[in-house]
């Protein structure tokens, strides 16, 4: 059975890899040539390299830290169970959990909700955040023109005792409701002061009439407005009331201009596309092949995070078993000799654990070389051949079985996988026959 | 002769070194038990978030998924409902769901997937455990040449990526179909055969590692007393090796239960699919319904979760056997 399902097929795959797409004609090395020359497969190689360089190391370190720290708590069993549990779930189910965690909309995806909370704390959005693709200038409707740096300026200058009206549209009525907007009301002009109104200049009862103020039009509350002197310097700033009115008192002589500040329209954080192909390294100026080789798409990192959640329990449990088998006397001796906690860990624990750590590391290297389940479940489109998160294993599947079948190329990729695993195989053989 | 003043001899034993400043600082900085507890507590909570979110989503009305985050349930616990589960298992009217999300789900398809998962996992587990035990017995206690070479070959096969075998085996299955009239491609049997073949190397390895620790004298004594190999295996080795066999069986069961790739290749497009493939397909339907996916995921993890919690030690032992021995 092993011969029929494991050994013979391996040889058959090697033979297929020298054949064309339908396994009918020998084509020599051409599959291997295209493997190393087309951007599609280079992307798969690159992703495997990212996985192999990042994941085994990080997951081993996390496992080590968890194992060492959990020796100091009384509830170590409970802790280990919690960390270990994800291994029992299928990678498919776990991936689906993470599609939800990485959802773009911060109202739905936890990851973006957290980023949004932090981001808004340090960098709060304006009261009237623009929606995607909207420009500040597009809001200007009557008595307003686009000013510099995303501001809106009153189109006419005003003197003390005068009144400015600025009509805006393109703001979601819900935003106004949330801000407690009341029907717009013209301010009463007063001597020595500049007064004005900012309102939603769209009336359902008079849709064609622009610039008139009607009872079914709301004022813009809570809007930051500035008064600029004729040389452009800011004289005063204030905020509009629930009716959209504002007033600058005792402005003195001269012509002024009212400006609506840009900060009012600052959009909030709208979500990072965690499962997107955007590269973390600047490669846009490079050619296609160089891009394929050098960019690190964000989705790879997100997937690695999800995979860490799944596998940290495994490395932790194996390292903990190694720790339990350690010679306690050596650790005690180090303590008695006055070594600090950190020195003991660095100089005694780690060297003694080295064999276990190596085994864990190699196991994880083999694991991620064959990475498949999480790739096809978290990146539905980007795992297709040539997609930014495709790997050797996902390419073998898609080229071998799912649409656009090319048996020769798929086999050549499978052979590459096999070749990459051979060092790990030799390592295992050496370790086991050495005993 | 002049007497030279006797130089002050250095003390034979160096004075006890004063602990250096940095060492004192380090000692003070040494994380206290309290800090370790706090940090690990936070990590444990953090680790629970994904599972918890999946669980809560599966118990919230389907229509709410796109509207608000699952964490809103903590301020509105009345949202929790069994509707999704009822809907998933009966495939009844879609209007029963809050928001009237159409399910597009054939009635009973989850139950069918659950059954298919069991139909694949149980035979694959039994066969791997049984064949591995026999093979390991033969390798450890047999008296034929080349036992060690066979064992090392099996160790080598342990890491062979199963991707290497998919294409030829699929072709082989189809050829079998055209020659004998029975085509294992697209059948549960075909999947089981593949799983057994790729489960054997690890199984033999694990069982061999256990058997090698048994006293050979026991077997020799049995042989001198005239017991046949089968009797020895059944009466002596099995009772001693049952714990190891249990570890292997549980490990293998969870492994096969969670497989996606083999099912995808050999059963893709088939109406009877295991749960992993069911979820995979659901994710790819137009307008994927997350309530089906989250509820289905919960269903898919229940069985391995029960197996794990019931036989935790065996499972961990099976896992460690592959890594540390």
Image (cartoon, rainbow, N blue to C red):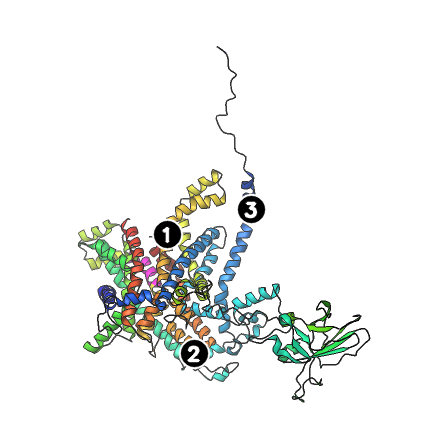
The image quadrant that residue A196 belongs to is bottom right
- At label 3, counting other C-alpha atoms closer than 10 Å, the crowd grade (few under 14, some 14-19, many 20 or more) is few
A270 relative to A348 in the view: left or right: right
Residue that badge 1 annotates:
A358
Of residues A362 and A186, which is closer to you in this image? A186
Quadrant containing the N terminus of chain A in the rendered view: bottom left
Residue at left offset 19%, top offset 56%: B227
Rendering coords of residue A72 (x, y %)? 49, 50
Q: Residue furthest right?
A: A191
Residue under disc 2 on the same chain as residue under disc 3: yes
Residue under disc 1 on the same chain as residue under disc 3: no
Q: Is residue B163 visible?
A: no
A205 relative to B277 in the view: left or right: right
Rendering coords of residue A81 (x, y %)? 45, 59
Q: Measure how far apart labels 2 and 1 are at the Cα level.
A: 46 Å
Q: Measure how far apart labels 2 and 3 are at the Cα level.
A: 56 Å
Against A13, residue B207 (above or below) is: above
Residue that badge 2 annotates:
B89
- Boundaries of the magenta span: B238-251
Residue that badge 3 annotates:
B29
Which of disc 3 and disc 2 is earlier in sequence? 3
């Amino acid at each position: 059975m092993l011969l029929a399902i494991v050994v013979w097929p391996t040889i058959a795959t090697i033979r297929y890899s020298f054949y064309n797409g339908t396994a009918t004609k020998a084509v020599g090395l051409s599959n291997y040539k295209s493997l190393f020359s087309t951007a599609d497969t280079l992307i798969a190689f690159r992703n495997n390299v990212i996985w192999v360089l990042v994941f085994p190391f990080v997951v081993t370190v996390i496992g080590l830290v968890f194992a060492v720290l959990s020796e100091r708590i009384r509830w170590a069993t409970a802790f280990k169970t919690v960390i270990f549990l994800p291994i029992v779930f299928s990678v498919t189910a776990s991936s689906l959990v993470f599609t939800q965690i990485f959802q773009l909309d911060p109202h739905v995806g936890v990851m973006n909700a957290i980023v949004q909370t932090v981001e808004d704390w340090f960098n709060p959005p304006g009261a009237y955040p623009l929606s995607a693709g909207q420009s500040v200038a597009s809001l200007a409707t009557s008595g307003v023109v686009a000013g510099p740096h995303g501001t809106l300026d009153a189109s006419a200058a005003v003197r003390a005792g005068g009144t400015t009206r600025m009509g805006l549209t393109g703001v979601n009525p819900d935003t106004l409701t949330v801000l407690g907007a009341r029907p717009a009301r013209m301010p009463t002009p007063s001597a020595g002061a500049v007064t004005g109104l900012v309102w939603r200049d769209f009336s359902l009862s008079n849709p064609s009439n622009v610039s008139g103020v009607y009872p079914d039009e709301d004022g813009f509350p809570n809007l930051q407005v500035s008064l600029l002197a004729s040389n452009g310097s800011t004289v005063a700033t204030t905020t509009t009331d629930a009716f959209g009115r504002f007033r600058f008192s005792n402005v003195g002589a001269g012509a002024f201009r009212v400006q609506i500040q840009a900060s009012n329209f600052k959009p909030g954080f709208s979500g990072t596309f965690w499962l997107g192909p955007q590269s973390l390294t600047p490669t846009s100026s490079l050619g296609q092949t160089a891009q394929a080789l050098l960019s690190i798409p964000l989705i790879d990192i997100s997937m690695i995070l999800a995979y860490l959640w799944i596998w940290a329990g495994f490395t932790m449990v194996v390292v903990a078993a190694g720790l339990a088998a350690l010679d306690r006397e050596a650790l005690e001796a180090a303590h008695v000799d006055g070594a600090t906690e950190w020195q003991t860990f660095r100089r005694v624990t780690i060297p003694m654990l080295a064999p276990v750590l190596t085994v864990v590391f190699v196991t994880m290297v083999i694991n991620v070389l064959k990475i498949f389940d999480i790739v096809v479940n978290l990146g539905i489109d980007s795992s297709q051949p040539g997609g930014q998160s495709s790997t050797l294993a996902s390419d073998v599947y898609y080229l071998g079985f799912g649409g656009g079948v090319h048996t020769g190329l798929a086999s050549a990729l499978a052979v590459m996988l096999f070749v990459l695993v051979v060092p790990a195989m030799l390592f295992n053989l050496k370790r086991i026959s050495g005993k | 002769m002049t007497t030279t003043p006797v130089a002050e001899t250095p003390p034979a034993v160096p004075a006890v070194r004063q602990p250096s400043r940095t060492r004192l600082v380090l000692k003070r900085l040494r994380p206290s038990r309290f800090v370790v507890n706090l940090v690990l507590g936070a990590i444990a909570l953090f680790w629970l978030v994904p599972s918890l979110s999946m669980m809560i989503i599966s118990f919230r009305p389907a229509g709410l998924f796109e509207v608000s985050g699952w964490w809103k349930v903590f301020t509105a616990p009345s949202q929790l409902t069994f509707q999704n589960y009822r809907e998933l298992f009966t495939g009844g009217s879609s209007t029963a769901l809050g928001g009237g999300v159409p399910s597009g789900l054939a009635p009973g398809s989850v139950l069918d997937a659950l059954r298919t998962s069991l139909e694949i996992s149980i035979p694959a587990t039994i066969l791997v455990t049984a064949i591995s035990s026999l093979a390991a017995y033969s390798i450890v206690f047999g008296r034929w040449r080349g036992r060690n070479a066979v064992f090392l070959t099996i160790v080598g096969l342990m890491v062979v990526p199963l991707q290497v075998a998919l294409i030829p085996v699929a072709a082989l299955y189809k050829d079998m179909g055209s020659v004998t009239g029975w085509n294992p491609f697209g059948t549960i049997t075909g999947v089981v055969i593949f799983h057994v073949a790729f489960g054997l190397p690890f199984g033999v390895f694990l069982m061999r590692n256990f058997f090698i620790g048994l006293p050979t004298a026991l077997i020799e004594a049995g042989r001198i007393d005239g017991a046949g190999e089968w009797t020895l295996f059944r009466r002596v080795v099995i009772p001693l090796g049952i714990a190891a066999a249990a570890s292997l069986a549980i490990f293998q069961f969870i492994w096969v239960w969670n497989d996606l790739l083999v099912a995808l290749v050999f059963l893709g497009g088939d109406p009877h699919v295991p749960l992993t493939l069911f979820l995979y397909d659901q994710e790819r339907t137009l307008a994927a319904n997350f309530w089906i996916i989250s509820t289905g995921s919960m269903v898919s993890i229940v069985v391995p979760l029960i197996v794990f919690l019931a036989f935790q030690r065996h499972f961990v032992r099976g896992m460690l056997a592959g890594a540390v021995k």
